[in-house]
Structure formats: C-alpha cells, structure tokens
Image (tube, coloured by chain):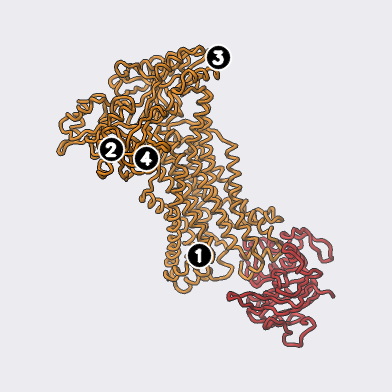
Chain colours: A orange, B red
Amino acid sequence: MIRLLLRAAPARFRAAPALGALPVLAIALGAGAVLSVQLLNRAALETLDAGLEVISGGADLVVAGLVEEAGSVADEAWPAVLATPGVRRAAPVIRLAGLRVGTIDREVSVPGWGVDMVSGSFYFAGADEGTLAPEVFFSGGIVLPERVASRLGVGPLNPVWIGLDGAGAVGRRPTLVAGTYPGENGHASAFLDLSYAQALRGRPGLDRIEVSVAEGSDVETIRSALSARIPGTRIEESGTLRAEGADLFAAFRLNLLALSAVSLLVAAFLVYASVRAALAARRQEIGLYRALGASRRRVGTLLLGEVLLMALAGAVLGIPVGALAAGASLDRVSATISNLYLLERIEGLTIDPQVVLLAGLVAVAAALAGAAPQVLAESSRAPVTLLAPGRASLSPRRRRFWRLGPPVVGTALIGAAGWAALDPGSWPALPGSGFGAAGALLIGAALLPDAVIRLAAGSRAGQNSAVGRGVLAALRESGSTGPPAAALVVAVAMLVGVSALIGSFRATLDAWLGETLAADIYVSRAGGAGGARSIASERRALSAEVLAATAADPDVRDRDLLRALRIRLEGRPVAVLGVDAALPAAGDRFSILGDREAALAGFGRGELLVSEPLARRLGLEAGAALSLPAATAGRPLRVAGVYRDYGNEQGALFLDRTLMNSLYPPEPGTPAPVHGAALYLREGADRAAAVTRLERTLGPSANVVDNAALRSRALDVFDQTMAVTGLLRVFALVIAALGVGLFLWTLVRERAPEVALNRALGADRGQVAAGFLGRTLVIIGISLLIGGGAGAVLTLLLVQVVNPAWFGWTLTLHWPLEVLAAQAAAVVLAGLLAAVLPARLASRLDATALRQEI
Amino acid sequence: MSPVLELDRVVRRYTQADGSELTILDSVSLGIGKGETVSVAGRSGSGKSTLLHIAAGIEIPSEGTVRLGERDLAGLSDPERSRLRGRFVGLVFQFFHLVPYLTVRENVLLPARIARVHEVPGEAEDPTEVGAAADRLLAAVGLEGRAREPARRLSGGEMQRTAIARALLLGPALLLADEPTGNLDARGAGTVADLLFRLVRDRGAGLLLATHDPELAARADTRLRLRGGRLFADERPPSSNAR
C-alpha cells in the first residue's frame, strides 16, 4: 500500500501542482526563517569569539587586565608569567580591533591579532611550509586566512597595506603577505608579529597572555601563583571568556529566536491548511482504503508519511531560502550587534551543517504538528461518511469539548499573559517568563478566532450582495475560516507588538536624548563612531591640540570633558565614565530615576551614578556600595543614584573625572586621556558658526557635531539597530498571507459545486469572485480584531516585562499610530492579494461542476 | 403559443484525450411551451444532463440554436446568460445542491439574493416581497416548520422539496429537472414528483425533466428518449415536439 501511494504521488502532484507546492513553500519559508536566525546568531557569536577566543591552542589560563583597555597587561607581565613554576608556555596576545587589509583596488576588514609565533601553537602555524614564510612574518608580514586572501586576490609574498579603522590613508603601512592558512572551523583572523602589531596600534602593552600549564601541575595552584606574582590582572580559565561572551548575547539571540518562532508557528498553520486541502481532495480515496480494510492507524500513518515527505522537501528548499535571507539581513544584524554590543561588524556567514539540520528538524516537527489534527480527524471518520457523496465535506459537528475547549484555553492563556503585562511585579520572575507569557498569548490568541466566528454566525445581514453572502459563508463555516484567521492573528499580534515596542523604545530614546544632551557641541576623536561605541574597542583619546583649541574658542563658556574605560563587573563589561561633577551643567546630562537632587548632590561628593541596566543586573540602588576592580577593592564607592541609559545594555557608571583619574591613574609621565568634550556656548552664540569654526580649526582629526546632529545620529543608529526585526516581520506576514491564499484555494476546491450552484442560479463571475472577497474580509477583520488586541497585550508584555528583565530598560509606552495604521493597511493588502488567485480560480468555474455534489 | 424553450439542430461534441471527437447530442431539436411538461429518458451517459445544461445556457452547443423565450443564447455574453438563467430558468438537481451552512429559507431565497430581486410576481401578478414568496413556497412544499434550520439537517426528500421551492421562487418560465427523484426512496420520490408537477402546472411553467424512472417520465405530457445522441419519441409515435 505504501508503494502504491508513493507511486501515485507524482501523478497527484501533476494533477494539482499548487496543492503540493504551496505547503512545501510554506515549510521552506518556516525552515528558512529559523535557519537564517540561527546562521545570524552564529555569525554574531563568531564575531564575538573572534575577540574572546583563546588563539594560542591548548591554553589553560588567560591573564587579562582588570581594566578592559588595549594594552592593559604590561609587557613586563610576560616574563613574569614565564618565570612562574609550572607554566609550560605563555603566549602574549594583542587584539587589533578594526584591522583593515587592502590592495590598490580592494580592502577588507578582518579580525586581527598580534602574536609571538614561537610562544604558542597558533592555528596558522600548521599551514604548509610552502604557504608560510616565517622570515617575512618576523619582519612585519601578515598571515591571512585563505578566504580573505582570495577576496583580495593576493597570495604569499604579494604586497598589501594594513591599517586600523579610523586611522585613514595616512595610517596605512605597506607590507607583504607572509602566508595564508585554510581558516577552517570559523577561524578567520589575520596575524602580525607582536612588536609590529604594537607599533601599528601605537602603544605598548598586551591585551592578554594565554598560559599553558605543564603536565602534572595543578591549574588552580598556578592560578593562585600568577595572581600573587602579577598584581592588577585577573586570571581566568580559558573557557570563561567565551561563556561570558555567549551570555552577553543571550537576550539578543533569544529575541531573534522568538521572532523566528512566530514565523514557524504561522507556517504550522499553513501546513494545517495545506494538509486540509490535500485531504479534502482525497476523502473518497481515504474512504475506499478504509472500506477495503485499512485500519485508522494505518491510514493515519500513511498520511503522516506523506506529510513527512512534503516537509523534508520543504526543509531542503528552506536551506537556500534561509541562507539568502541571512545574507540579506547580515548588514542589519551586524549594525545591531555593533550598536548594542560594541563589537565590530560581522564579516560573513558560515553554513554549519548542524545548524541546517536543526532548522530542518524544527520545520519538519512543526509541519507534522500542523498536519496531525487534520490527519487524525480524517482517519477517524467512518468509511461510509468518507464515501457518501456530499457528506464528508460538511463541517463535522464537534463535540462540546472541541467547541468549548479552545476558546476557554485561549482565554485563560490570554488572561495569564494580560496579568503578567498589567501587573509585572506579581509575575514569577523566572528566566524567560516574559517570553513564555508572550508565547502563551500568541497561542491563546490563535485559539480564539474559531469561537469568535461562531459567535457571529447568527448574523443575517448583507445577504443581498455577493460580498455579504461571502461574509455569511465565512461566518457560518468557522471550521474553514478559523485556521487562516488564526494564522493571520498570530502575524498581526506580532506585528503590532514588535512595532509598538520599537515605537515606544524610539519615543523613549528621543525624549531621553532631548533631556540629557545638554551641551551645545560634542567633540570626539575622528574614526570612532562616537558615544558608547568609541568606548568599546580602541579608546581614541583627544589630542592635546584638540583640547587646547576647544578651550581657546571664543564662544565656549564651559567644557565637560569625558574619560572612558571599560572594566568587568560580574563577568560582563561595564563602561566607566568620568565627567566634571563640579560643572554647573553636569547634572543636566542625567535623567535620574528617583530623588534627583540627592543623587546629583552625592555625585558631586564623589559618589557613583549607575545606569539602569547595570543597577538591575547587579541589584544596585541609591546608597548601595560598589567596588571597582583595580581601583577600590578595599574602599567601595557609594551609589548616589540610578540614571536612565538607553545607550547600551551592558551597563555604565559615571563618577567625577578627577576621582576617576586618581583611581585609574594614567601611565606615568602622560596626562589622563580625554575621550570626548561636551562644549557649552555663551548665551547668544551662533551654534552653527561655532561648529564650522571648530571643524576648520580641528581639521579631520576630530568629529564636531552639534546637539541636534548628535540626537539625529543616535536615532539613526537606533533605527539601524532595529532594522533586523523588519525581515522577520515580513516573513511572518508573507507566510500568513500565503496561508490565507491557500485556505481560500482549498475552499475553491472543496466548494466547487457550491460555486457552480451559484453560477447555475444566475451568479456571474464577478459575483463569485466577490463572494471570496467577502470571505477574505472576514478573515482579515477577525485577525485585525483579535490580533490587534493580542498585539496590544503583547506590547505591554514586551515593554513592561521582557525589556526590563532582559535589557534592563524602562520604556515609556508609546503607540506609533501611523506605523500601526500602515501595517493594518499592509495586512489588508496582503490578505486581499492572497485572495486574488483563488477568487479568479473560483470565478472561472462554471455550472457544469454541478455534476459533483456539494 | 410561443415556446419558452426552443432547441434547433443542437449538436454537442467533446474532444477526447486521444484527440478524437465524441458527439453527445446530434442535431437535437425540441420546443417546450408554457405549461407543457416534457420528459427525456435515456441510458447513463446518453446526454440527458448535457441537454439540460445546454437548455439552461450552462453549456454552449457546438452547433445549433438555443432560444430561451425570445432570446437567442448564442448572442449573449456569459454575464447576460447568467442573468437570463437566474430570472427565466429554475433548476432542480439529483443531488439537491443545497448550501449546507444556510438555513432552509435562506437556500430558497438564494436566487433572489443573487439576482438582487426584492419582489416577485405573486398569484394575481401583483408584486410580492421575496421573503413572503419564499414562506408561501415553503408552506406549499410542507417545510414551513423547518425554515430556520440549517439545510444539512434535512432528509433527502426534504432537501429536494427545498430545492423545488428554490427553483420556483422567481417564477421561472422554464423548470429544468435532472433526475429529481434519482436519489430518493420510492415514497419520497412519489411525494416530490407530485409536488413538482402540481407546482409547475399551478404556475404555468414549462418543464423539461430528465429521468430514468418510467413512472415519473410517464407523468409528462410528452415522453422523449435520447439514443445515440438523437431524440426520439418514447413508446408512442413521435409527438409534434420531437421534430
């Protein structure tokens, strides 16, 4: 029997190609959504790993600076580590953030490292001798991964230039390619000799030393010995950095994953629709098998087997779909992680077979879950019902449980989610509970359309128009209208929730920027992206000349100078920012949560102001004590207050710059660095003229932006950051629209005799098409009604539960009505477009189809 | 008496999968006047349903002329044929073809909804509101007590009675019935046949009836048989209708 069905499958496909192709396409889109998100997540992690991975091979411990500044481990620490008993090998490493390699006509950005080749077992060192020239490497040559070399079109001993982001053409240095290596397993960094890397970076010092312990030695003992021998550093086990890095991304990855899950949920509805369509066309065939003695289980198994084949085909097709989608959104995700997590951009995607397999399995599972209810229902019907003309296509009378169960469960789920949204404090603060509530809400909302349609089924209005009769048909046949409406409900709820969240976030950010960008003009070193990002990788201090020029400007009344460095608190990076607390306008830069006067007074006395995300993560509030590593271990500082900060989710704290300079003194003989200057102009001064004058005076070495430009730039960065959600929203909408189209198409097949009857009774083609339009309007209306409501609750959940819990941000609720209206229009348009083909197909039917039964 | 239906040398051919042509109706001519009843018998596949479809304007003949009242169907577009069929022809089918999710009354009213008609000619040719007309028809077919029930809950006989009421709602000049008792038991068939002939005669409509059932066929004024695509008088000399 299996063989018979398999042999008949191609003929079935030829008979109704769309019926076979559409579900495969739906599964492909679902698999593609999951795969693209997984690939992007992986690429983001690889980028993170590029900065955190242990690169020397076989290292047990890592010696790193307490302050995460470039060169924070002194050069002298290396011999000290080597001299520690039990240390077999110590590899000094520096990270060349923003390394660019180029030829005359091409250039690429590549993770770069400065290493001492003989002190570690670096993965490029295993390359064929023919492709590595050590003497060139020791003379400043660069080793490139083959992927990068081929993109540049260079090979060993070819000339290239190297330079760091922001250094401009002047900072480029010519060199030779010392070798290439395969760059497998995601290793795709470039390597320079340590001393040349330090010269390129323009400062001494190491970023870390990777330590291998001699055989038989106890790692913990050596760790203690290193701590004692090299003060001012932290000694971590080699896996710790990566684990912390992965943790850093958890919220971001979960967000993307949740969005892709929505696409998958919608795709499952689509599979349900297509299986329903396929089975509707084969009821008599199934009835025949049953009549000939096939058991329910056997028929069910066979049907699920067919769905499995369909799902596998969809999953295979989903691989290129996912890869293309991931490639298309790579820049957006790259911008997001650059902005949110202060990393460099993602260079490329690696298609990992494990990820492909995972996405395929998830899609197949979703397809089987979507198909199971319909397969179960069909295989459970009595053969006589399946064989009797005109009976099987009627909506079966459902038992009370199936009529009442879904709406009751749906209402309960929505109620629970609503409770979590409206009273976040009483909701159990379990990890992921916000996302759990959001998932429950979407499932609950998807269970409601059927019941709402049944409630409206008593309506008799509008039967005089073809559209009205279509509406009536949709309302009377909840079994047909419910599933596509449910798919669209999920998509609409997701669209509303995510859009309103982003709208709230943007409005909050805008208000916050207006409140806290108090100075008239901001000056930073050219090459950094400005603001938080310049704190991220390489600090770019303002030169003495720039500082002198800002002080000498005739319109500048006050200068608020900023020093920035990064430390780690409880395993995650935190920006430490020093400003002039005594400056009259210094307090204007903060939007304080709680008692503003007390917080600013404390800040003036040398206490800390901590950002909201940091306060949430560490459980800090005004009056708490906080020890800063390498600075106040024995003398914790008091927290004066908490300020709103939407700049980064990692956390930041402010303190007086003079205090900061005493806690983190600069290198002997050098002034404390200043990374930014906020300038306050005299009353009546022309701000635009001042910007122009400063730009002229400072030249290309500094960025000079006024208040408005900085605000607009920050909002641009925000928009760029959130753009990644756009693709996934489009995915969900497209899949839902496909679902609506497929359902209507199913109806055309199922209801061909009914259409024919209408034609026989005098309806013209336009009236038939209008009937399908009426059905579509019901689906769209129900989805906007329930999806809009669920979307509003989802917004509250995301704003009031998910965001504070995962990102530590308090957002002010804001409904972007224009965006929501545009999206509602998009939903209506997508639904109507989806209805065009089925309506056209239906209108082409003529009354001769009455040879079949309704 | 001018005919309500006139078929003149109608031919219907189908192209088969192998490219050869199959002639289902071969130069069929037929006329039905107002109040006249005609039955057409024939084996399965003899072309009875095709004949009815052509008479209703559902199918287009390969050759020949079809006139419904004064109108020649050949010159009409699809929407015009649809409109004419809706107002001029009533259809009754073997499998009833009721819309299962509509009530009995809504099924009867369906032709009026499609034709956007609010009034129909009453018994004294006075305009009658379609709802009232539907109620009267339901009473006439004995279903007034079940008017608000979904059609799917009816028995086969009740479904066919509903279909007859639906076919007569707009007062068609011609009723086409394709095996109207073919899916009913003997008792149900008798009831439906009585009803069909009584209502057709009461309303003065023409009736073209395709059936296997000799008893039903015998109730018609004229009995014809389709054989080899041609129309013959059945068990009596060809009548004037079978030209």
For marks 3 and 4, the one nearer the N-term is 4
For marks 4 and 1, the one nearer the N-term is 1
Q: Please identify the quarter of the rendering in which residue A134 is found.
A: top left
**Camera-side mark, 3 or 1:** 3
Is A344 on the left-hand or right-hand side of B194? left
Give me the C-alpha separation between circle 3 and circle 4.
48 Å
Chain letter behind tag 4: A
Residue identifier under label 3: A685
- Callout 2, which amino acid? Ile
Q: Nearer the viewer, residue A546 or A346?
A: A546
**Camera-side mark, 2 or 1:** 2
Chain letter behind tag 2: A
Q: Dot 3, how many residues are within 10 Å of its Cα: few (below 14), some (14-19), or many (20+)?
A: some
Residue A45 is marked as 4
Q: Dot 1, how many residues are within 10 Å of its Cα: few (below 14), some (14-19), or many (20+)?
A: few
Residue identifier under label 1: A13
Give the quarter of the figure containing the C terminus of chain A: bottom right
